[in-house]
Image (cartoon, rainbow, N blue to C red):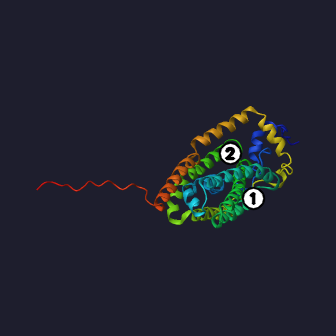
Amino acid sequence: MGKVERVDVHSADANPADANSADPKSTDTHSPTVPKKNQLTAAVLTSLALLSTAGPLGTDIYLPTFIDIAKGLSTTASSVQLTLSAFMIGLVVGQLFAGPVSDGVGRRHPLVIGSLLFFLFSAGCMLTPSIGLLIAFRLLQGIAGGTTVVVARSVIPDVAHGRAAASAFSALMAIQGLAPAMAPLLGGFLSPIIGWRGIFWVIAVFNVIMVVVSRFVVLESLPADRRTPGTIRKLLPTIFRCFGRPAFIGYCFAFAVGFARSSPTSRPHRSFSRTNWAYRRTFTRSRSPSTRSPSRECPPSTANS
């Protein structure tokens, strides 16, 4: 009779790590499945940073044109300052509501729609004939810009986790940090050449680039099975819960104080008011008749010959 070889049936289970490594198809079931096109490449990170620059781009680049806007629309300094306040309010509202909406419908459509509306409202700011319409367009412009800011940053947690997400956010903030530094310089350089209306055309050109990258570069990162519809109804309870946390209140207060102390938007108001007052004073003096008293002339000398 032939020898019967003894086979250890437990040998295959002795080292499960080797078994998993031998199977190339084995994956971690806890990690989300992300399509290859949605990986955070350099092009995607640069596009997300561009979409996140709506705040600095909409505030800092047109600050050097405050005096020109006041003269062009025949308005006061405080009315021009309201255009900045309206944009900041719209930026808050847009971020507040666009985030929950994108959790239910996905990231791509809010990005494209927000970028397109940003472009349309920038064109409206350029063509506006009055300060009232400019304030209204700036409010709508801020809402559209807030949409692109919050949705662009939401793409990273969809496709990366842990250290990968931290590295992606660091790269995003590094690229995005160039906007507050470059926007005032660009606005100060271009405003004497193209005027304040041309500055809004520059913003509109950036918006066109935002539409292109949101349509063709940044693809959908939130699959349908991971979306949570109905989050807009839970928005107010969530806000109340956040305001009940001291850590959240402290973070908001620290961020507000730091922004108010470091942002250039907190200083041009006073300088603009002084400059505008000096302009009005000089203009009034040039238009009014001279009130200077005639100089006393010395009588002709009567020196004895």
Q: Nearer the viewer, residue 80 or 164?
A: 80
**Disc 2 to disc 1: CB gap under 8 Å:** no
Q: Which residue does the numbered mark 2 point to in the structure image?
A: 165
Task: Farthest residue to the right: give it.
Answer: 1
Residue 188, how many percent across, how many down?
Answer: 51, 57
Disc number placed over residue 166 in the picture, else none:
none
Left or right of 293? Residue 224 is right
State the residue at coordinates (54%, 64%). Answer: 195
Whether residue 230 is visible to the viewer of this picture, yes or no, is yes
Amino acid at circle 1: Arg
Residue 77, how many percent across, how many down?
Answer: 59, 54
Whether residue 53 is visible to the viewer of this picture, yes or no, is no
Q: Nearer the viewer, residue 92 or 232?
A: 92
Q: Secondary structure at mark 1?
A: helix
Amino acid at circle 2: Ala
Q: Which residue does the numbered mark 1 point to in the structure image?
A: 108
